[in-house]
Amino acid sequence: MGRALAVIIWLLTLASVVLFLSGWWFPTTITEHGPRVDQQFLITIIVVGIAFVAAQIGLGWMVWRYGANSQNKDERALYTHGNNRLEVLWTVITAVIFISLAVMGQRVWAQLHFSDAPADAFQARVTAQQFSWNVQYPGKDNKFGRTDPTLIKEDENNFIGLDDRDPNAKDDITATTLVLPVNRPAELILRSKDVTHSFWVPQLRFKQDLVPGMEIHVHFTPTKVGQFQLACAELCGMNHFSMKGTLVVLPQDQLNDLMNLPPTQFQPKLEELRGKYELGMIYDEKGTKIGKSY
Amino acid sequence: MMLKKRARLWLAMTLTVSLLALSFACGGKKDTAEDNSSGDNGTTAKTFAPKGDEGTVTGKVNLTGTAPAPQPIDMSQDANCKSKNPNATTETVVAKDGKLQNVFVYIKDGTLADGSKIGDWTFKTPDTEVVLDQNGCHYVPHVIGLQPNQKLKVTNSDPTGHNIHVLPKSGGGNEEWNESQPGGAGPIVKSFKRSEILIPVKCNQHPWMKAYIGVIKHPFFAVTKDDGTFELKGVPPGTYTLAAWHEKYGEKTAQVKVDAKGTATTDFSFDAGGGTASVENGSLEVMPAMDLPMLMKH
């Protein structure tokens, strides 16, 4: 069994490597920062992949060489106190590798979370609740209307407590679909009504918690048009599995037309536009199909 | 031999004491709320029996002013809902030609012709079930009424799952419950122990879904139809306070006198501009946003 086990270890290692080399990867990214996140993942996978393969080859070799049915049954094991110099060396090498990866990765992460969104960014407030997504758009005046939790009336379509007495709220649009323009920075203001949720569109290459009592800002620039599934990535209750929404990235002119409509005409027009873009496909900035997103 | 006898005695005594303790623990205090046959106030009362001289109360509920237009509901989160009910609209105010639907009309209080209070009588629990269906991701009917301990049958005619969350007032004697009902699942049968005007029902899966259940100890209640009319049958002669309850406009009352075998007519009127619902909306509590400079823009 000893040598067979060694062979199994090597075969599993080979299968893992082949899986990655065969092109198995994330869904196509649709954001400006996405390629940098992918590059970071790739570098990390190459580094840890080399370490993984080396460790598995070594493990297999040990099983082959010293297994129960090896030819060296009478060979006696050596006792060692260890080697301090070697310990320090490989700990330092590991630390340098991981710290370098973290430093490389933090720039793109911090750019999404800590730097200001550009002044011309398209804004949308995303308010999560068990078990749905609510999106508020500021409308023509580009100002969000006031919201107040005491005004929430879910059976009257007021899921976020929008105060209709506020002049800024008159043209605000609320929907369950997140619509963003292509090639224009988008800023999301993430909030939660009840428990912690997590905003996750795999193609956007970021995942962000929505925490009750906090307004979390994040910004990015979509570069492809299409429809993409928005999922909640934080177990938020019994029906967490059903908490899904849709992100629709539209060409600039289509988005402008949509946002300039009166709130009552928003949903029918959005349905019409969604009909143009197949879920799972990606389109260029003019709306021409260019391939699959996954 | 003596020791054995003594040991047996101790064993018998210990067993007797244990059994007594167990019987006290299990069957000691009876929950008075379980039995509503003696009426809401717990006093012993006579059971009402029709004498054949009962009358009828009819009327209609008007809505003055411009009724708020029903708003389309965005059901995108559940494709099954959207395909089954593509033109769903809000149902808070359903009015046609100035007549208000879904108003719960009931006898709130009053005195029978023999001088007895209606609240002092008890009423037989009907054997019939009251059905609340989930169809097209909304509740049908929107408002229902039943008596304490009468069976409520909740059905799901949708191909998707629902989660029925019934929210009675805390401390009112009725229990809050919250159960999932997948598409194609059998009915859920429940009942309420106490009278309550009115119990909100929501779906935890589809936040726009709302219904109201009126639980009332007597059978003298009705829900207005699409033409705003209502009819309360079998009302014993007497003088009563008639109440009309609407989820957005609250409650209004009127005095009504029912003669033997007579028909009394009472109309109600709500102002479309008003809007003080007398029932909590049952929404989840929302935490106001705080300023957290670390994660805010800087």
Image (cartoon, coloured by chain):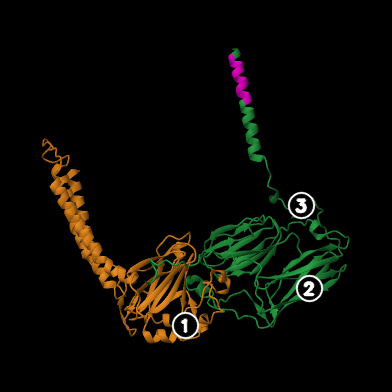
Chain colours: A orange, B green
Q: Quadrant of the N terminus of chain A?
A: top left
> Relative to B211, is A123 on the left or the right?
left
Determine the CA span between mark 3 and mark 2. 29 Å
Magenta stretch bounds: B3-13
Above or below A170: residue A81: above
Which amino acid does the dot numbered 1 rest on?
Gly
Q: Is residue B162 one of those drawn in magenta?
A: no
Determine the CA span between mark 2 and mark 1. 48 Å
Of callouts 3 and 2, the N-terminal one: 3
**Nearer to the camera, B8 or A103:** A103
**Nearer to the camera, B118 or B281:** B281
Above or below B125: residue B224: below
Above or below B4: residue B38: below
Which amino acid does the dot numbered 2 rest on?
Thr
Judge if badges 2 and 1 mark residues of a common chain.
no
Mark 3 vs mark 2: in front: 3
Q: Which residue is mark 2?
A: B58
Q: Which residue is mark 1?
A: A139
Q: Secondary structure at mark 2?
A: strand
Q: Main secondary structure of the magenta part?
A: helix
Mark 2 vs mark 1: in front: 1
Q: What is the crowding at mark 1: few (fewer than 14 residues within 10 Å), some, or many (at least 20)? A: many
Q: Which mark is residue B38?
A: 3
Residue B275, position as x, y percentages in the image? 65, 75
**Nearer to the camera, A84 or B283:** A84
Judge if badges 3 and 1 mark residues of a common chain.
no
> Relative to A38, is B79 on the left or the right?
right
Residue A26, position as x, y percentages in the image? 29, 68
Quadrant position of residue B188: bottom right
Q: Chain of mark 2?
A: B
